[in-house]
Image: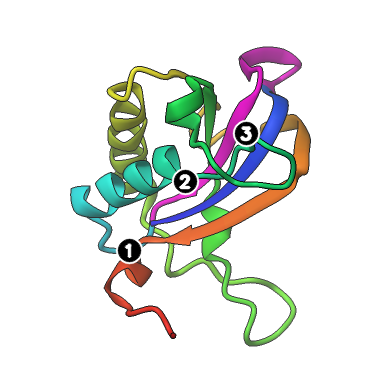
Amino acid sequence: MRALIQRVTRASVTVNGAPIGAINRGLLVLLAVGQGDTEEDARYIVDKTVNLRIFPVAEDRFDRSVLDEHLDVLVVSQFTLYADTRHGRRPGFSNAAPPDQARTMFDHTVDLFQQTGLLVATGQFAEHMLINLVNDGPVTIWLDSTERHTPRNR
């Protein structure tokens, strides 16, 4: 499972011109489900996301998490995070989960976010969406659940 996390002052998503989700200060999470992702992957992404200390208390310090600050989260499905661009000019998406599996895992992951007690808004799965955001910092973090088994280089 992959997530691109952006610290935002506000973010919203619309489908066919209608607003379907919006948040104030918090995190925009673009979420992709990969082939073979499990509930463990979802738990890892949610836990890592809500506990990332990327909000400042003092200037230029990352001291607090979205959970610490009781902020909002907007979760939007984005299978294109699994784009394979190594060959040719058209990205391939064979590493992304099939739509039925991805929808189930996406919904499960949103449920896990909601269980944290934070205000959670979502996009609409498998729809063309327009996302409006104000990236704060800018701060953008990439998470990949497969990396949880890889030791950090020291």
Amino acid under label 1?
Gln
Amino acid under label 3?
Val
Q: Quick check: is 19 in the magenta stretch? A: yes
What residue is pinned by disc 1? Answer: 35
Question: How many residues crowd mark 3 within 10 Å: few (<14), some (14–19), many (20+)?
Answer: few
Amino acid under label 2?
Leu
Which numbered marker is on residue 57?
A: 3
| First in residue order: circle 1 vs circle 2 | 1
Instruction: Give me the residue at 58% from left, 67% from top.
Output: 83
* 61 lies left or right of 133: left
Q: Quick check: is 76 in the magenta stretch? A: no
Whether label 3 touches label 2, CB < 8 Å: no
Residue span colored magenta = 14-33
Q: Quadrant of the C terminus?
A: bottom left
Q: Nearer the viewer, residue 132 or 82?
A: 132
Instruction: Give me the residue at 26% from left, 45% from top.
Output: 43
What residue is pinned by disc 2? Answer: 52
Q: Nearer the viewer, mark 3 or mark 2?
A: 3
Q: Which percent across, then down, holds residue 32?
A: 46, 51
Disc 3 is placed on an element classified as loop
Q: Residue extending furthest front?
A: 58
* 6 lies left or right of 60: left
Q: Quadrant of the N terminus?
A: bottom left
In the picture, residue 109 is in which quadrant?
Answer: top left
Q: Is residue 2 above or below residue 10?
A: below
Number of numbered tags placed on the structure image: 3
Q: Nearer the viewer, mark 1 or mark 2?
A: 2
How far apart marks 3 and 2 lie (CA) works out to 14 Å
